[in-house]
Image: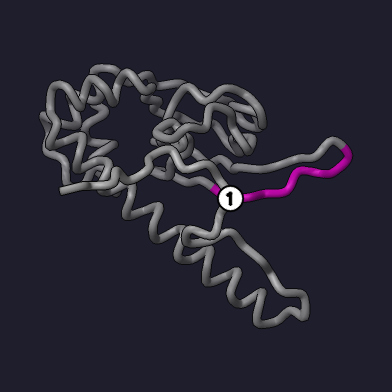
């Protein structure tokens, strides 16, 4: 049943039926009512979610500010992709606009796919990276236009200019 719904999602279009069904063995489908908040900023990230019906939005809200929409989510859109990173808390909240169904996969589901069908896991990650690259590229374009239209210079830690700690250091090869 989930196979037919997920095959239409761009993350799965290169996976075959066995690979999608393998991941679906560990899936959990949850139903949400209109205006229900699914997660809040600071909540632990436990799942990767894909909308299979309905609409939602990602938003941020400060203590003294109204909610600000970050992104609208429609059928086959997803959130929680930071489950694959070192992040462990949501940096946005998620709220549904209408009755919505979401299929969730936790980290163990992806570990299961990796162990049972490594090619399917690699293909899924490649599709996710393609999506994230496109989103990053669009974001850089928006920032570039803001920079061009502004008298205030934007200084962004891009392309290795970050002061973030490096986790892997290259080894020196000696002869």
In this image, 36 relative to 129: left or right? right
Could you tell me residue 65's position as x and y percent? Answer: 85, 43
Q: How would you rate the neighbour count of disc 1 (Cα within 10 Å): few for under 14, some for 14-19, many for 20 or more? A: few
In this image, 111 relative to 152: left or right? left
Q: Does 157 appear above or below 16?
A: below
Return the residue nearer the eye: 88 or 69. Answer: 88
Residue matched to label 1: 163
Could you tell me residue 102's position as x and y percent? Answer: 44, 29
Q: Quadrant of residue 21?
A: top left
Which image quarter is the N terminus in?
A: top left
Q: Does 123 appear above or below 143?
A: above
Q: Secondary structure at mark 1?
A: loop
Q: Does 172 appear above or below 4?
A: below
Question: In percent of the image, x 58 and y 36: which residue is there?
Answer: 98
Question: In percent of the image, x 20 and y 39: which residue is there?
Answer: 122
From this viewpoint, is residue 51 visible?
no
Could you tell me residue 97's position as x and y percent? Answer: 61, 39
- Range drawn in magenta: 64-72
Q: How many marks?
A: 1
């Amino acid at each position: 049943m989930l196979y037919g719904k997920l095959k239409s999602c761009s993350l799965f279009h290169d996976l075959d039926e066995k690979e999608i069904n393998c991941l679906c063995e560990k899936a959990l489908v949850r139903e949400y009512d209109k205006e229900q908040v699914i997660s809040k900023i600071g909540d632990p990230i436990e799942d990767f979610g894909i909308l299979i019906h309905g609409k939602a939005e990602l938003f941020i809200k400060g203590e003294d500010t109204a909610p600000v929409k970050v992104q609208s989510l429609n059928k086959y859109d997803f959130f929680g992709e930071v489950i694959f990173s070192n992040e462990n808390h949501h940096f946005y909240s998620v709220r549904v606009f209408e009755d919505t169904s979401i299929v969730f996969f936790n980290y163990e589901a992806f570990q299961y796919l990796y162990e049972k069908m490594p090619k399917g896991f690699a293909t899924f990650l490649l599709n996710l990276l393609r999506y994230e690259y496109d989103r990053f590229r669009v974001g850089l374009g928006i920032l570039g236009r803001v920079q061009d239209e502004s008298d205030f210079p934007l200084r962004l830690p891009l392309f290795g200019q970050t002061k973030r700690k490096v986790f892997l250091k290259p080894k020196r090869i000696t002869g």
